[in-house]
Structure formats: structure tokens, C-alpha cells
Image (cartoon, grey):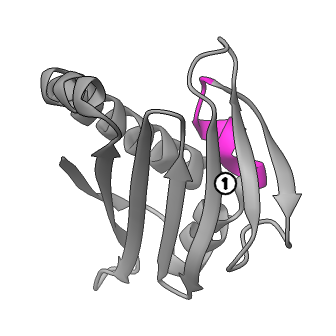
């Protein structure tokens, strides 16, 4: 299952890229996260691994930074029942703002989880959009 969200952020791409790629900021815009725990590598750099610890004790994800370029970030999120490939790209608009495209591809593990994934598509897409809008607000507040 794939979810894609595209929106414009009132901040320059270089600043948006820095805020998006650094996992220490995740709890500032992903409100359901309690903390990010580094596992290995320099946080946010290719090959680094960290855990996303939720506030409510729900699904725990382990994130691996697959690649990080100036205007692109690829992550792999792994949980017990699902893996998610995350691809964020940034481009500069003529007025200096940033167009941010976030794509998430979900791979559900096992028959029951795949069935759940089909039923949960609307909720997954809604949550993805909510996260990206929260990131937009965060990035615009911290763009200076």
C-alpha cells in the first residue's frame, strides 16, 4: 500500500532538509512519539539506526536511514507486523519556498496483517497526511 502527500512549506529547502533528516526533532512534530533512541551510527546519517518509542506503548518502529542527499531522505521503518519505506523529497519553488513530497510504502507481514492493511488504508493515509502537515507547521516555525 502506498500513501503520498505533497505540500508547500514557507521555508527554504536547505533548512527544511536539515529539520526533516535529524531524528532528534521527530518528537517536536510527531506528537505520538515519546522519544527517539539512537541504536547505532550518527543519528540521521546513512546507515544509522534508531528506535521510535511511542507515548502509548503501541507499535515500536526501528528506523534505518537508507540514504540522505541534500534534497532527499530514504528511511526503512520496521515493526513486528509491518515495514515502511519512507521517501521524502524537497524542491525549491520559484519564490524560495519548499515543495515537500512524502511517500510511504507499507509492506504488511503475514496474511492477517495484509488484510488489516487493506481495511486500515484510509486511517493510514489520514495519519500520514496529519504527520506531514504537523511537520510543515514545525518547519515554518523553525525556519530561521
- Residue 79 lies, with reference to residue 75, above or below; the image says above
- Residue 47 lies, with reference to residue 87, above or below; the image says below
Identify which residue is drawn at 85% across, 72% down.
41
Q: Position of residue 99 (x, y in %)?
A: 32, 70
Identify which residue is drawn at 28% across, 85% down.
94
- Residue 69 lies, with reference to residue 76, above or below; the image says below
With 5 as the anchor, is 21 left or right in this view? right
Which quadrant of the figure contains the C terminus? bottom right
Q: Position of residue 98 (x, y in %)?
A: 39, 72
Q: Main secondary structure of the magenta part?
A: helix
Of the pair 38 and 92, the residue shown nearer to us = 38
Was residue 83 drawn as part of the magenta stretch in this picture?
no
Of the pair 10 and 74, the residue shown nearer to us = 74
Q: Which residue is mark 1?
A: 142
Local crowd size for mark 1, using a 10 Å CA cut-off: few (<14), some (14–19), many (≥20): few
Residue positioned most to the top: 56
Of the pair 126 and 60, the residue shown nearer to us = 60
Of the pair 99 and 36, the residue shown nearer to us = 36
Identify which residue is drawn at 56% across, 54% down.
139
* Count of all numbered marks drawn on residues in the image: 1
Q: Secondary structure at mark 1?
A: loop
Visible residue check, residue 143: no
When asked about the image quadrant of residue 45, the answer is bottom right
State the extent of the magenta-drawn residues as a range.
24-32
With 68 as the anchor, is 118 left or right in this view? left
Visible residue check, residue 76: yes
Q: Position of residue 52 (x, y in %)?
A: 68, 39
Q: Position of residue 88 (x, y in %)?
A: 41, 67
Amino acid at each position: 500500500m502506498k500513501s503520498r502527500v505533497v505540500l508547500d512549506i514557507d521555508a527554504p529547502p536547505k533548512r527544511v532538509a536539515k529539520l526533516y533528516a535529524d531524528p532528534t526533532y521527530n518528537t517536536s512534530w510527531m506528537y505520538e512519539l515519546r522519544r527517539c533512541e539512537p541504536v547505532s551510527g550518527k543519528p540521521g546519517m546513512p546507515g544509522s539506526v534508531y528506535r521510535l518509542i511511542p507515548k502509548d506503548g503501541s507499535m515500536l518502529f526501528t528506523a534505518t536511514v537508507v540514504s540522505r542527499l541534500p534534497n532527499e531522505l530514504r528511511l526503512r521503518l520496521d515493526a513486528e507486523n509491518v515495514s515502511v519505506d519512507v521517501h521524502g523529497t524537497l524542491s525549491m519553488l520559484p519564490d524560495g519556498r519548499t515543495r515537500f513530497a512524502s511517500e510511504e510504502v507499507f509492506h504488511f507481514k503475514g496474511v492477517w496483517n495484509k488484510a488489516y492493511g487493506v481495511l486500515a488504508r484510509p486511517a493510514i493515509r489520514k495519519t500520514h497526511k496529519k504527520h506531514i502537515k504537523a511537520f510543515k507547521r514545525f518547519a515554518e516555525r523553525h525556519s530561521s
